[in-house]
Image: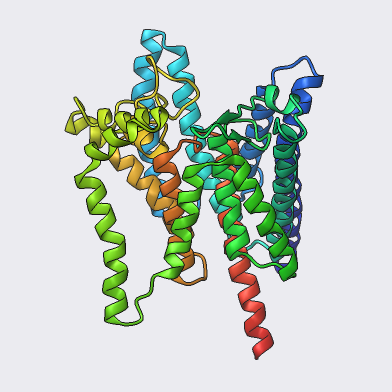
């Protein structure tokens, strides 16, 4: 019986590794396929979506049978919201709204079961090593694409004009590359943050390899020029700087954390007015965060206004009210209760990593700091990147920590 189980695990691990590679290869080829073939590049997204569905159905022998409580509650909550909303949209003929809500529902199921399939104790350590290698390879491709995209370096227009790639400039008129990821600089910033966890917290056989990747990561981060990314990386650094070894250092660390937050909250409108003179884009974002809670009832805050409006495939109305932030957008759509369930699913998976609190808090804090400021989590590839990075850190801490213990014995 054990032999059959081992064969099944080996077989599914092999398939999982192949599918991870396929998702990265498809994303790397996206701009070139869009340029060469007379098809809509969104078909690539559809194929990636089908691959991820395969992850959570055929490859999971416990599909819908072994879900922990936060995940089950999240799926029940989002399903109830979708069913009620879909009935109304069906009778009113709102096809776009129905499709957008369905996308949010399926994305939530994918998130839950991607975690389940990648963080199960049955997975061999080779799957995490292979996944890390593919993620590193894809990162290097995006770095190369950044160099190709840049108008002052190699200036390859194909990577800016095809594959749903959108580059931009910041207030300093600095070009911002998106690594050919098939989205905006915001999406690329999310991917870079997920990859940074691998660089900081995962196992590498060679220190020189990690150091080289850190240098390339620094250059890539500059080419992307995402302030949200810089802030998230600073948060990780900050977590590793603060200390609670004694009362004095603990009080000082808490003051460093709490005082700036209180000043920011108390003086939010003053800061917003001052900042609007410097950066109109960010000013609009800050204003939209304020507008989010105006004329917003307590019931809407708790239960939401309907999934898919701000964090689905299509935008309802004239534009996002969420200020381009996933947390505010999802809260507006699904309500604070459903958002807290989503938060608990992700944090519970991160907390299962066998590591110290600094690693866990760095991942949770930097991720949600990014998602408060930016969107990006709407994209399936970004969800996949976040989950895979967490899984790789999980596998690295589990297996390589065990190896060190065994060697010491």
Q: Position of residue 357 (x, y in %)?
A: 43, 69
Q: Is residue 372 left or right of residue 63?
A: left
Q: Position of residue 289 (x, y in %)?
A: 30, 33
Q: Is residue 204 left or right of residue 395?
A: right
Residue at the extreme bottom: 409
Instruction: Say above or below: 11 vs 256.
Output: above
Residue at (38%, 33%) from the top-left corner?
A: 278
Residue at (34%, 40%) from the top-left corner?
A: 338
Residue 260 falls in which quadrant of the image?
bottom left
Residue at (43%, 69%) from the top-left corner?
A: 241
Residue 13 appears anywhere in the view = yes
Residue at (35%, 36%) from the top-left corner?
A: 328
The quadrant of the picture occupied by the N terminus is bottom right
Toward the viewer: 263 or 117? 263
Residue 64 appears anywhere in the view = no
Residue 337 falls in which quadrant of the image?
top left
Q: Position of residue 87 (x, y in %)?
A: 36, 18
């Amino acid at each position: 019986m054990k032999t059959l189980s081992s064969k099944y695990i080996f077989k599914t691990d092999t398939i999982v590794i192949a599918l991870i590679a396929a998702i990265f290869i498809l994303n790397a080829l996206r701009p070139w396929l869009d340029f060469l073939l007379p098809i809509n590049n969104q078909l690539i997204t559809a194929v990636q979506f089908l691959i991820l569905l395969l992850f959570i159905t055929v490859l999971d022998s416990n599909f819908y049978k072994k879900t922990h409580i936060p995940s089950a509650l999240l799926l029940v909550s989002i399903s109830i919201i979708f069913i009620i909303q879909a009935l109304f949209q069906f009778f009113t003929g709102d096809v776009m709204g129905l499709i957008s809500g369905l996308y949010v529902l399926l994305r939530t199921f994918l998130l839950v079961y991607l975690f389940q399939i990648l963080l199960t104790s049955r997975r061999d350590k080779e799957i995490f090593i292979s996944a890390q290698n593919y993620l590193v390879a894809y990162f290097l491709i995006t770095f190369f694409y950044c160099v190709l995209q840049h108008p002052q370096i190699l200036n390859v227009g194909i990577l800016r004009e095809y594959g749903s790639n959108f580059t931009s400039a910041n207030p300093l008129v600095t070009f911002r590359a998106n690594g050919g990821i098939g989205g905006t600089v915001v999406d690329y910033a999310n991917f870079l943050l997920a990859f940074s966890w691998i660089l900081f917290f995962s196992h590498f056989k060679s220190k020189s390899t990690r150091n080289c990747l850190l240098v390339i990561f620094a250059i890539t981060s500059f080419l992307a020029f995402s302030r949200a990314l810089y802030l998230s990386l600073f948060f990780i650094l900050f977590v590793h700087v603060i200390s609670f070894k004694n009362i004095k250092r603990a009080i000082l660390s808490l003051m460093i954390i709490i005082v700036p937050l209180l000043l920011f909250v108390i003086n939010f409108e003053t800061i917003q007015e001052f900042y609007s003179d410097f950066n109109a884009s960010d000013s609009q974002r800050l204003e939209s965060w304020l507008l989010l809670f105006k004329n917003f009832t307590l019931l809407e805050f708790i239960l939401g206004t309907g999934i898919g409006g701000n964090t689905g495939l299509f935008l309802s109305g004239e534009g996002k009210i969420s200020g381009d932030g996933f947390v505010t957008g999802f809260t507006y759509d699904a309500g604070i209760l459903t958002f807290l369930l989503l938060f608990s699913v992700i944090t519970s998976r991160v907390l299962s990593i066998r590591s110290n609190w600094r690693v866990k808090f760095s991942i949770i804090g930097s991720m949600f700091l990014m998602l408060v400021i930016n969107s990006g989590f709407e994209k399936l590839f970004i969800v996949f990147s976040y989950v895979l990075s967490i899984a790789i850190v999980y596998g690295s801490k589990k297996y390589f920590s065990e190896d060190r213990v065994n060697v010491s014995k």
